[in-house]
Amino acid sequence: MYPKWIILSIVLTALSGPVVAQFSVSGEFRMRPEYRDGYATLRDSSKTPYGIILGRARAIFDFKTDKIMTRFSLQDAFVFGQNNYASDTISKNTVNMFEAWFRYSFTEKFALKIGRTEVVYDDERFLGRSDWAMWGATHDIIIAQWGDPKKNYNGDLGIAINNVAPANPTVPYLASYPLKNYKYMAYTWEHFKLMEDKLSFSFLALADGFQAPSTTVTKTTTDTLKIRNSFDSIIGTTVTKNTTKVTTDYPNQVYLRATAGLDGWLTLKKWSFSLSGYYQGGHYKDGKTINAWFYSANISWKVIKPLKLMVGYDHLDGNDFSDTTAWKTKMTGFSTLYGTAHRLYGYMDMWNSYVRDNNTAGLNDLYLRATLNFSEKTFIEGTFRWFSLARGFLNKKDAVTKLPYTAVDKNLGQEIDLMFVYKPIPNLDLNAAYCFFLPTKTMELQRDIQEGKSKFAQYAYIMVTYKPNFFTSEKK
C-alpha cells in the first residue's frame, strides 16, 4: 500500500518542474512511569494499586517541495517488560506505520492530502490526536484543503471510507464491516480570523456512519438415533440436541450520525474568552434517533505576568432513563466523537470513553485553573473540577423499586490535578503530576461499587519526552 504514495509523490514532483526540496528526519522518545490507584475508574478493596511504565518511540521522515509535502512515521507504543528480555522472539509486536500521507498543492489556495494522518482541529474536542495515549490516533482519509492567508481564512473537507481487507470486489460499498470504527465519515471545517487575529471562529460539520450491529440466533435441532445391540438389532432410540449459532451481518444498513456547531475565541490584552455550541442528530449505531446538545464557555485572566486564572464550564447532554417509553426509540446523550479527552476532562481519565458515548446520562464539568510561570522553561498548574450528571437517572436497575433505572443525586465528585512542567533544553520536556478524585455515592453507583466502599482514588506520573531533529537538509 505505502509504496504507492512514494511513487505518486515522485511522479507529481517530476511534473511540477524545478523545485526547492528539503528532507528531514526526526524522532520522539517518551517514557512515563505511572502510579495507578483508582486511575480511569474507582477501585474497592478487591483491587490493589500498581505501578506501570509506558513507552513510545517514533521515527519521522518528512520531505517537502514547493508543491509536495510527504510524511512517513513509524511508531512503537509499548509497556516496559511486555516482551522477554533475553529472546529473539517478540510476542507482542507493537511497531506500525503511524502516519503515511502526502499533500499536493495544485495552487497556493488549494491542496489535496491523502493517506494515514492525524486529524486535528481547534481545541481537539471532536477531532484530535489523542496524544496522551501512547498509541495516538490517526485516520485513513482524503482531505481537500483550501484557503487564503491574506484574508485569514482556510477550510478542509475530509472523506473516509472504511473496509476490511481484502474488500469485496463485487460490492465494495456493501461489504460487511464488523470493526468498531465508523464505516463512513465526512466533515467540513471552516476557520476565520478577524480584528487582527484577536477574534477567530470555526464551523465544524461531521457525519459518521456505522453499520447496523450483527445479530446472533441460537438454533437447536434434534436427531433421533437408533440403538442397536451386538447382533445389529434395533433395541431402542435416543434423542440428541444439536445447538448452533448463526450470525447475520447487515452491510447495507448504515446508521448516520450528524454533528455541527461553532467555536469562537476572543483574545484581548489580559483577557481571553472561548465559547462553543454544537447539535447532534441522526441515528445511534443501534438505530435509535439522536437529539442532543453540547455547549461550553471559559474565561482566562492574566492577573500578573506569570499568573493566569481560568474558569470554565462544559455541558454534554444526557439521556433521561426514567422515560422508558422514549428511551426505546431515541437518545438525548451527546458524544464528543474522536476528540482528545485527557486534557479536557481531567488528567485521571475518568471520562475518556464516557464522553464519546451517546448512551449516558451526560456530564457537566465546572473547572477552575491556575497557571504560574516561573520562567519560559518552567510552570506549575493546578486544576479543580466538579463533575455532575446532566440528567439525574442512571441506566441501572433500582434494587428497591425494581425499576429499570435509578434516580440519583447529580453530583459525581471533584477532581484535583497538580502538574509541573520543566523544559531544560529545546525539544526536551519533563512533566510530572499528582491527581486525586473525591467521589460521591452517585459516582460509586455509576462505577458499580457498593456505596461507601470505594477507596481514595489517586494517580501520579513522571513523563519524559524528547523530540530530536536528527537531520535536515539544506533547501535545494
Image: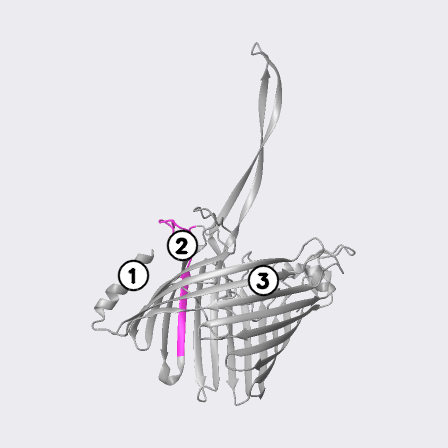
Q: What is the distance, in whole Å, between disc 2 and disc 1 at their CAs?
A: 27 Å
As helix, strand or loop, the secondary structure at mark 1 comes to: helix
In the picture of the structure, the residue carrying the numbered disc 1 is 6
> Element type at marker 2?
loop
Q: Residue at x 51, y 77 (%)?
A: 262
Segment tinted magenta in the rendering? 154-175
In this rendering, is residue 24 above or below 224?
below
Q: Which residue is mark 2?
A: 173
Q: Nearer the viewer, residue 78 or 157?
A: 78
Q: Nearer the viewer, residue 64 or 278?
A: 64
Q: Can you say which quadrant of the picture contains the N terminus?
A: bottom left
Q: CA distance from mark 2 to mark 3?
A: 44 Å
* Residue occupied by mark 3: 34
Residue 257 location in percent, x, y? 51, 63
Q: Counting residues from the N terminus, which is met first, the one under dot 1 or under dot 3? A: 1
Residue plotted at (27% across, 72% down): 21
Earlier along the polypeptide chain: callout 2 or callout 1? Answer: 1
Is label 3 in a helix, a strand or a loop? strand
